[in-house]
Structure formats: C-alpha cells, structure tokens
Image: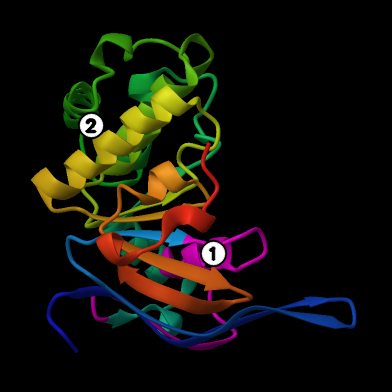
C-alpha cells in the first residue's frame, strides 16, 4: 500500500433492507485519499455521498468490501476497537453542529478530551487554544444559543480539532449557515489543510464549498462517475447557494 494513503476503500458495497426491498446505496466503491489532501464528495440527493462519508468515518460498516484507515482494516475491528481507532484518527464536523445546549463553547470543545486520560486543567487549556485558533476565543464562555450559526460551526470545528485528528470529515458543513459564514468556514478548513497538512474530506452539494477542494469525487447512484483535480472539473452542474 502507498505510504501516503490515509484512507482506502476497496470494492465497498452498502445495501439497506427496507422491508422486502433492497436499496443499494454504494455499488463497489474504490477510493484512495492521501495524507494532506482536501477532497470534496459531491452528488445529488440519494447519490450515496452521505453513506460514503459514514464509511470513510467508520460510523457505519459496509455490506461487503474493505475499508483501511491509516493501514488498519477497520472492518475487522470490534466496536470498542473501532471507536478507539476512530477517536484517534478522525474529527467530525456536522451540518447541525451537534453542540450540547447546556454547555459553554469551551465545555463543548473539552468534551472529547473527557474520555481520555487528560487532566481537567490540560483539557481546558488545550480547548482554549483551539478556540482562539478558529477565531472564537472571545466567545468561549457563551452557550450555543448565544452564538450565531457561523460561530457555532467554529466551535464544532474546534471540538473536532481538539483531539488532534489526522483527518477532518465535514458533512455539509455550510448547510445550516448563511453564505458569508459558509465562505469563512471553508476558508478556515482550507487554512487548516494547507498550514497544518490536515486531510480534509467534505460532503457537499454546494458549488462554492466544492471549489475549495483540490480534488472532486462525484457520485451518482452509488458509483463514482468522476474523480478529478479541481482545475479539471466542470462545476456548472453543481448547485450554487
């Protein structure tokens, strides 16, 4: 296996049973993502892009095929082993932010560290530094309801970064915020990719989001129909917010 590959899917298939009907969400996906890449996964609703993201993030396992995360076959791990490996390697950013409403921004960012053998003082300091890095340090003692959508998404990014993951997975990260805030969030993810060499994988149906990626993977009916560099990709068929 190529030493630079952080994620590899080999002939991945995912079938969901809905009563007597089988829905084929992914139909033999082969995909390699290198360390430090910025990849956008695009496609219309029902194309399989969210299912693919769940596979890449090991939130779900394939019906068949193999998924390698940093050279470890995650399809062979137990649930507890999988949770530990995922926690070490991946930081998640969701469209709905998934912040705990009763916790401050700082406490939300500290939360993933509470499951590790880290002192409260160290967790608080590390979280404070990360919040400063994403430009929301001045709001760290506010509850989510006191923050704008863009500010909440920055907190969510800080929470993903605090565990120092090698891969950042963002599922429609601009879907719940306005266009200007969306541009700021994508600029932040681009900066993390370029300056810290973080691998970033974004699922989106928005053209302005996909344009920030260096590589575009397009799905249709559970299959990859295009996989190309940004400058070679025709963006005309992607929805613009």
The image quadrant of residue 34 is bottom left
57 w.r.t. 224: above or below: above
Q: Which residue is mark 1?
A: 49
The image quadrant of residue 191 is top left
Where does the image place residue 154, in percent across and percent down from the top left? Answer: 35, 28
Residue drawn 16% across the image and 85% down it: 2
**Residue 125 versus residue 205: which sits nearer the camera?**
205
Where does the image place residue 37, in percent across and percent down from the top left? Answer: 22, 62
Where does the image place residue 100, in percent across and percent down from the top left? Answer: 52, 28
Q: Which mark is residue 123?
A: 2
Q: Nearer the viewer, mark 2 or mark 1?
A: 1
Left or right of 138, for residue 240: right
Q: Which mark is residue 178?
A: none
Can residue 156 be seen from the camera position used here? yes
The quarter in which the N terminus is drawn is bottom left
Q: Residues within 10 Å of mark 1 (few under 14, many from 20)?
A: many
What is the spatial separation of the Cα atoms under label 2 and label 1, in whole angstroms? 34 Å
Residue drawn 32% across the image and 28% down it: 184
Tell me which segment is drawn in magenta.
42-71
Label 1 element class: helix
């Amino acid at each position: 296996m190529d030493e630079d590959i952080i994620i590899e899917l080999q002939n991945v298939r995912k079938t969901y049973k809905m009563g007597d009907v089988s829905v084929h969400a992914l139909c033999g996906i082969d995909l390699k993502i290198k360390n430090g890449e910025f990849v956008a996964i695009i496609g219309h609703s029902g194309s399989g892009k969210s299912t693919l993201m769940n596979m890449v993030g090991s939130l779900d396992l394939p019906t068949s095929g193999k998924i390698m995360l940093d050279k470890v076959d995650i399809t062979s791990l137990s649930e507890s082993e999988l949770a530990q490996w995922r926690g070490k390697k991946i930081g998640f950013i969701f469209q709905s932010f998934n912040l705990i409403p009763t916790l401050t921004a700082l406490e939300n960012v500290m939360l993933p560290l509470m499951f590790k053998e880290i002192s409260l003082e160290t967790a608080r300091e590390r979280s404070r530094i990360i919040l400063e890095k994403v430009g929301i340090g001045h709001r760290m003692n506010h509850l989510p309801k006191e923050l704008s959508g863009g500010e909440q998404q920055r907190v969510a990014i800080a929470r993903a970064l605090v565990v120092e993951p090698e891969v950042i997975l963002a599922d429609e990260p601009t879907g719940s915020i306005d266009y200007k805030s969306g541009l700021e969030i994508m600029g932040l993810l681009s900066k993390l990719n370029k300056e810290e060499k973080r691998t970033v994988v974004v699922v989106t149906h928005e053209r302005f989001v996909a344009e920030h990626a260096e590589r575009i993977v397009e799905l249709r009916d559970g299959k990859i129909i295009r996989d190309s560099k940004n400058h070679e990709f025709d963006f005309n068929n992607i929805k613009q917010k």
